[in-house]
Amino acid sequence: MTLTLDFLDDGRVARWTLTPDGVAREVREAYNPTLFVGDAPADLYGRTGGPSPSPPARDGLSDVLADLRSFLDGQQAVAGLDVESHRQTFRTDARPLLRVDAASIEAIRTIAKRVRQFDQPDTFTCYNIDFTRQLRYCLETDTPAAPDRSVRDLRTLHLSFPSHESGIESLPQLTVDGDRVGASPRDVVAGVREVLTERNPDVLVVSTADLVPLLFEAADAYGVEFTLGREAGYTKLAGESTYTSYGNVGHSPARYAVPGRVIIDESNSFFYHESGLEGCLDLVDRSGLPLQELGWASIGRVLTAMQIREARSRGVLVPWRAWRPELFKSASTLDTADRGGTTFAPDVGVHEDVHELDFASLYPNIIRTRNISPETVRCGCCETDDVPGLGYSICEEDGYLPEVLGPLIDARSDIKAEIPDADGKERERLEAASSAIKWILVSCFGYQGFSNAKFGRIECHEAINAFAREILLDAKAALEEAGWRVVYGIVDSIWVTPADGREQRPLEEVASEVSAEVGIELEYECAFEWVAFCPMRNSESGALTRYFGKRRGEEYPEAGLGDAIKTRGIEGRQRSTPAWVEDVQSEALRVFDESRSPEAVCDVLRRRLRELREREVDPAALVVDNRVSKDVDDYSMETVTVAALKRARIEGAGLAPGQTVRYVVVDADARGAARVRLEYEDFDRYDAGWYEDAAVRAVESILAPIGWREGEIRQYLSGTSDETLAGFVDGSS
């Protein structure tokens, strides 16, 4: 069992494992990672990507692979060459390939690059190239990736530091588990060293990985002996970078490692943010991706680790690139296939007695129950018409992708069943595990359409959508036949209310019949006293993902809406919305629920705007949080966000695309950087007019379903100074 691994400069690997008192260190003297090289993609798939016969059998390497072997022989990056037989795809038999043992982890990329340069780019297929280093070691040496928690629980230490700060002079702002450890940079370094010695943590959770080099820089500057790991020094694994994923720009900060301890960077850890350390450890067990790497891994990377392990269990090598070309389609098939899930446009307005039903893990269960996998869809060996509307066949042989997802679906179902009876730490552990698995299941469908997915295939993506469309349409028909009217539906959820003049069959009964018919559970999710569907901003048509509703039987907690009101898409759900605007909208929602009176809601707005104009609002509640999508000089519009980026650059804290800027608008009519102040600057004013507009838009979202837009709201606010009786009754005035 492994806590973490250190790759030493001389090629050795140090493995750290938990002991009752601390850790044990074991060193492997020689480790040579391995890659494989095969012939061209057309040799596997044919020129059109269709299912070709099994590649020609042979006793040894092809001529071109033999030439490559001679070329690589004797190169410094190469530790050894051999011939081994392996399966290159799920539908081919094993045959001889060129095995290349690399001199080091770093040499893998060097060798792969030289293979591509040796001939035309499509002459060879390479395998087992871009594994993360700790995952590779665990795979190739059969080393368990998870720490042995039967020995003891992991010890964790939190180091927090303001994200906007830089330079050793700012180190006194660092806290360890919430406590300050020094008033000067020298004292901070000494204080951190003392805490590390006293607590001997296994996992360091840092608010920003920039702390790692900063602490070492301060130690050098002040002559303080310092180690952050269990041995001296640190390693920079990767520099910061900007990336684009599904149209969104993201920023990946630099990554660091220290000997004998895992570092989790809160600013760069999706799974730690969503499910905590327990959720991360659960995924380490399921994916085989060591904790140090899972800490910064994306959902796709964790899913890929699971797929890699399943492929290897079937004797299939892992391709470096997704070489398989898309199969030919007629224009009509392409038109039918190139669609997403079904959406029933919401009926704008407020609806009483609404019920939500959801298909449990719809897309993963479609994959599982319909045997959808890259090697099963349009397999070429089955002449069937399985996929509705597309006519694709699905092979009778079990696909590998259902084998990957099946255990996850079952595990989450079992965990959810255990949660109601659990309490304390056990409940937290189960909820963390459920959350972590949920994100893998949510993403497995989209990953099939991702061009760089190791085992993705667009035909799988199309087939899953086709089944999902048919399933939702069948559910709609069954519910309507049972006396229910569909007011909204999207992909895997459907919302119904009793149809006028009809007798309704019980929803649980109808859902059970639908579940049996499609083979996927249609669950009764929630009953609402009422649900309001919002129109689009500049249209009367329903917005597909903007609604709010009061759950039946739920009470409001002392502060906020709690679980009483479900919201989607409105300002309170948007990360850029200032806390004060979110609070105004929450109060407006409560009054709307109690009175259904637009005047009463506007009275709430009037009172909150009065406190805004009279400077009674804490500027900290007015911070806008926006993710940067471009370099500051690439923006063409002079928005307040651009002003904030310019100010950050002036302050020496320039931001890269994908990072977040936090600011308060102090004068929207000014020019350039003067329009805003950054969150951490000292200031005592704000632009009340700008925040008034934001609050009006937030209240408009609440009142638009009943016909009150911005014009009606402003007319009411300016047309009278009297409060409504309802406002006094509910206490909003």
Image: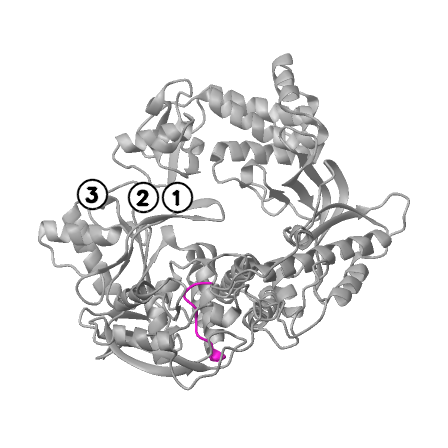
Q: Which residue is mark 3?
A: 167
Residue at horizontal 24%, vertical 69%? 7
**What kind of secondary structure does the magenta stretch mostly adopt?**
loop
Residue at horizontal 49%, vertical 32%? 580
Stretch of the chain drawn in magenta: 313-322
At label 2, which amino acid type do we have? Ser
N-terminal of the pair, mark 2 or mark 1, is 2
Tell whether 384 sits left or right of 621: right
Tell which residue pokes out farthest to the left in this image: 223
Q: Which residue is mark 1?
A: 658
Name the mark nearer the viewer: 3 or 1.
Answer: 1
At label 1, which amino acid type do we have? Gly
For disc 2, the neighbor class at 10 Å (few under 14, some 14 to 19, many from 20) is some
Q: Which residue is mark 2?
A: 163
For disc 3, the neighbor class at 10 Å (few under 14, some 14 to 19, many from 20) is few
Front residue of 594/130: it is 130
Tell whether 27 sits left or right of 512: left
The x and y percentages for residue 432 are: 49, 62
- Quadrant (top left, top right, bottom left, bottom right) of the N terminus: bottom left
Q: Is residue 408 visible?
A: yes
